Image (cartoon, grey):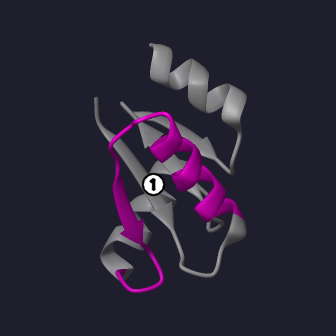
Amino acid sequence: MAVIVYSTPTCPFCHQAKDYLSQKGVEFEDVNVAEDQTRAEEMVKKSGQMGVPVLDINGEILVGFQPVLIDQALEK
């Protein structure tokens, strides 16, 4: 399973999303889009959004911290 979390250090919802995944034992790549412009552009291409967090769970793109949708994407 490939999980990427596009986030910034100051975003409270990003921290919630990463804490939630960690509590579930899900390994993920944490991409700080505040420091990596290339990856920030990748996030915008995938999601059409500038806001964070953006989660890529096996190619399914979720914007914001939405536990129910995260759980559904993880189950697929």
Residue at (52%, 54%) from the top-left corner?
A: 18
Name the residue carrying label 1: 5
Q: Which residues are magenta?
A: 13-36
Q: Is residue 31 above or below residue 60?
A: below
Q: Quadrant of the N terminus?
A: top left
| Amino acid on which disc 1 is placed | Val
Nearer-the-camera pick, 59 or 10: 10
- 23 in magenta: yes
Identify whether 11 is placed above or below 18. Answer: below
As drawn, the residue found furthest toward the top would be 76
Query: Across the whole image, how many numbered discs are drawn on residues?
Result: 1
Residue 76 magenta: no
The image position of residue 50, as x and y in percent, is 62, 68
Asked if residue 38 lies left or right of residue 65, the reply is left
Q: Nearer the viewer, residue 56 or 15?
A: 15
Does residue 63 appear left or right of residue 23 in this picture?
Answer: right
Q: Residue furthest bottom?
A: 35
Which structural element holds mark 1? strand
Of 54 and 10, nearer the camera is 10
Residue shown at the point (43%, 71%) measured from the top left: 40
